[in-house]
Amino acid sequence: MHIDLNLLRQEIAQRREEGCDVTAVETALGLATQSGKPLAQAELDGLWAQLQAMEHKLGCPYVEPSDLAGIRAQRPQGIRKQRLGLSDDELFDKTYGAWLGRSAGCQLGKAVEGWTRAKIRDYLTLMREYPLADYFPPPPPDAPPQFRPNVGSCRGKFQSMSRDDDMDYTILGLVMLEKYGLDFKTDDVGTTWQLTMPYQCTYTAERVAYRNLVMGLKPPATALIVNPYREWIGAQIRADAWGYVTPGLPELGAEFAWRDAALSHVKNGIYGEMLVAAMLSASFSTSDVMRVIEIGLSEIPRKSRLAEAVKDTLSCAARFRTWEEAWDDLMKRYGHYHGVHTINNAVFVLLGLLYGQGDFERTICIAVMAGLDTDCNGATAGSIAGAILGAKALPPKWIGPLNDRIKSMVANNTDCAISDLAKRTVAVTRKVLARERAV
């Protein structure tokens, strides 16, 4: 595998976050780059090897396994199954609401993907639309150059949910369940990607795992070999299909998520997907956002960095009147993470849910106004809120512009009715529930 300077720096950050003392490698890298000459490949490879050989510092407070048995051994007590009690119409309405909510939140955030909270606020202030309460307005011709959102995702500029990897993976999850059934394996996830998803439409950890698959590696090596992105947000955005088909079964939703995440991620990268899947499972059985979050939290290791961040977010929501005050406090602890890391973006999803207080519009707008990976966070927050509320309760302002259509890069699913995806999802859900009753 070819190691370059960017990969090495990302791996240094990753190992530091995992609890390793990277001082020696940072010092060596600093000395090697002082001359201004490019580092020889042997030097880069040697520093990389040092990073891989590192152990956690003594006294590291986190216990973060990546295997399912290890994760379950470290999770707190929790509700593994809930009473569902939904009619057929209610089950479809919630499933359809989750698909629509995810689409609307994703489309909203897609306009300003990667922007900071400050930049989003400044743009909306310029357009006299702060705080956010609708899809982003397109910029005027004389807008400053730094204010150039993705115009195709701005208000009045789209007629369906635009293609986005956040939505591709939700469709891929459904396709996997339809093809391989409820006992699908991590290997099946990799096969599905290679058969249905173009390599150039994958990013960071997913692209690394895809490359490793093509080179003949198998999980969990696909997540480990030259993958400094292994705790980034990629798995977290793949959680939704697993939660949709396991209503009231958060433990099973988290297990499905683990099987998927293990292809490309470790530790908190895996936990992010498990957390969201379990929260979605719970969203079909309760409208209490606090309960939804607590159930999700019960499926990940209690001494993990993600669990710590979730608890800190809950604490801030109890102490601060506004989401902005909570954001300021939380970023003192989590602002150092990369802009597409699992942990900081999960915090923003939770801020949307907690301060949205059951209102769909406020939920997705707060999750997006918080900044960073805005399409991912708007999608996840919208998915959970949509499942809680159901399609019939979602505001036409947000759902109407989608026209019940979604574009994707998933083979044989490039232009779908969102309602058809919901119907297909419910068909899988019925299989899950039937097997659960038979146990």
Image (cartoon, rainbow, N blue to C red):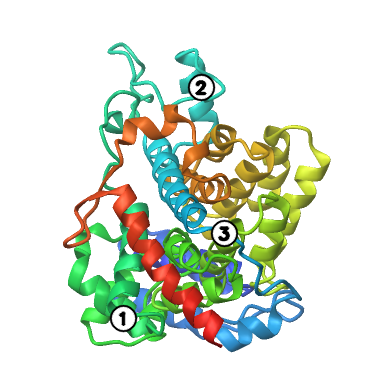
Q: Residue at x 73, y 34 (%)?
A: 325
Query: How much space separates mark 2 and mark 1, taking CA atoms?
Result: 47 Å
Pointer 1 and pointer 3: residues touching (CB < 8 Å)?
no
Task: Specify which label sits upstream in the sequence, 2 or 1.
Answer: 2
Question: Taking 10 as reference, is 20 left or right?
Answer: right
> In the rendering, at what x and y percent does residue 401 appear?
33, 30
| Amino acid type for the residue under numbered disc 3 | Leu
| Front tag of 1 and 3 | 3
Please tell me whether mark 1 sits on a helix, a strand or a loop: helix
298 relative position to 247: left or right: right
Q: Which mark is residue 243?
A: none
Asked if residue 12 can be seen in this view, the reply is: yes
Q: Which of marks 3 and 2 is nearer the N terminus?
A: 3
Label 1 Cα crowd, 10 Å radius (few <14 / some 14-19 / many 20+): few
The quarter in which the C terminus is drawn is bottom right
Tag on residue 122? 2
Disc 3: which residue: 86
Camera-near label (3 vs 2) is 3
Of pointers 1 and 3, the one earlier in the residue sequence: 3
181, 315: nearer the viewer: 181
Instruction: Please state which of residues 281 and 335 is positioned toward the viewer in this rendering.
Output: 281
Q: What element carries label 3?
A: loop
Q: In which quarter of the image is residue 143?
A: top left
Label drawn at residue 180: 1
Q: Residue at x 72, y 40 (%)?
A: 326
Image vertical order of residue 42 relative to residue 233, above or below = below
Residue 193 position in % (x across, y down): 26, 71
Disc 1 marks a residue whose amino acid type is Tyr
Marks 3 and 2 close (CB-CB < 8 Å): no
The answer to which quarter of the image holds residue 183 is: bottom left
Q: Residues within 10 Å of mark 3 (few under 14, many from 20)?
A: some
Return the x and y of residue 286 as percentages of the image width and height: 66, 55
